[in-house]
Amino acid sequence: MKHIAPLRRASVRTLLATGLVTGLALTAGCAKSEDSSGNDKASAQQEDPGQVVASPSGGSGPSCTIDSYGGAKVDLKSATVGFSQSEKEANPFRIAETASIKAEAQKRGVKLLTSNAQSQFSKQISDVQDLIAKGADLLVIAPLNSDGWEPVLRTASAKHIPIVTIDRKINAAACKDYVSFIGSDFVEQGRRAADQMIEATGGKGEVAILLGAAGNNVTTERTKGFEDRIKEKAPGLEIVFRQTGDFAREKGQSVTENLIQSKPGIKGIYAENDEMGLGAVNALKGAGKKPGDVKIVTIDGTRNAVQSIVDGWIDGVIESNPRFGPLAFQTLDTFTQGQEVAQDIVIQDSSYTESNAKADLGKAY
Ligand code: GZL
């Protein structure tokens, strides 16, 4: 890894709060993407449509610099970046997230090591330790869980390895255990889902929540945002059922099959991700229901879910954009050149209803 001569600390604050990722130069050079088994795979060059964009207020909090975090400046182009993915790539969210990271590494000519924890937290911890052992100078982590990161953070901080966490938050200290978090406002996603549910049901009747997996901030915050908003805006809507579908389509289907047995009058289902929402659609179809019999609102913005709006089965989808590649690498690049980056970079998410689903289907992932 080539260290660039210590630069005078940039006087220009480069907080990624402008909302746009700028200055991404297409660099020549063929990055190699190695998975944790060391197989070289030239990852396909692909544009990264719909990349995440920091919301204007999304990076306005405290910032982080190398001086405060520790470590030396790094020339990203000669460094090795390790990427730790959390869940198996059966979920379009994870597929799009990994593709975005690989495409950006390729675009920048940066060597990338990748790993996938297959939805097992203990494996994710050992994956990250392996990435460090294989020589990763910087890390991008999509955490499965929010807690339990101490062992690997100690290893990384002893080597002053800059870490950017994407998507879910870890319960650790920004600009000490990791540099920056880049992700959505999940409470806001829950609130927006509640607004769509109120619109779809007219604010009256019984609704169910298909909860995400336990142990991460996404489930907690999407639930809080939804419940608080319903209490605030639609007291006529009663949440009569809450059960986890583990963010998985099969479990979303089986939980919904039980739901419609125990609550035959259910009017709405809030699924905390598209995969569970699509499982719910399968259950309703199996029970002989028609599109619209039960109002469904989900979160992610995957192609199948948005198509399901067009088909009349799903009423609304709030986007949770996983295409972090450009912003994650831009954050690492800015930081390792000695400039400031925001500790918390909240991204903007769009949404879909029947009014835009057909026209905007191409933006889904
Ligand atoms: C949200 C992400 C969630 C997705 C699910 O940012 O952590 O995990 O909404 C995925 O699809 O399982």
Image (cartoon, helix red, strand yellow):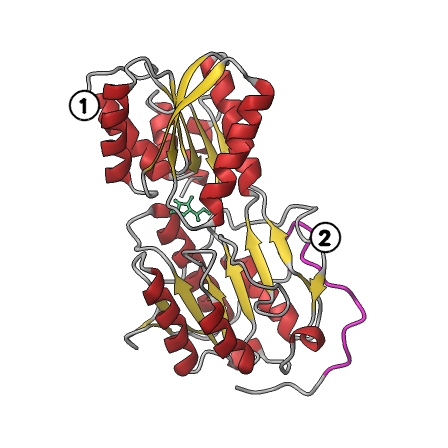
> Which residue position holds label 1?
286
Return the mark for residue 159: none
Identify the image quadrant of residue 338: bottom right
**Residue type beneath disc 1:** Gly
| Residue 99 x, y percent position in the rendering | 39, 57
Give the side of residue 186 with respect to residue 210, left or right.
right
User: Considering only vertical position in the picture, is 104 above or below 280?
Assistant: below
User: Considering only vertical position in the picture, is 276 above or below 87?
Assistant: above
User: Considering only vertical position in the picture, is 340 above or below 357?
Assistant: below
State yes or no: Cβ of the residue under disc 1 lies below 8 Å from any atom of ligand 1. no
Give the side of residue 189 with respect to residue 133, left or right.
right
**Residue type beneath disc 2:** Ser
Residue range highlighted in magenta: 7-22
> Which residue position holds label 2?
60
Q: Residue furthest right?
A: 11
| Residue 81 x, y percent position in the rendering | 47, 73
Q: Who's the residue at 65% across and 79% down the image?
A: 70
Identify the image quadrant of residue 201: top left
Q: Residues within 10 Å of mark 2 (few under 14, many from 20)?
A: some
Q: CA distance from mark 2 to mark 1?
A: 48 Å
Quadrant (top left, top right, bottom left, bottom right) of the C terminus:
top left
- Any part of residue 114 in sight: yes
Q: Earlier in the sequence, mark 2 or mark 1?
A: 2
| Residue 25 x, y percent position in the rendering | 58, 65
Q: How many numbered circles are shown?
A: 2
Front-most of residues 352 and 295 = 295
Front-most of residues 261 and 86 = 261
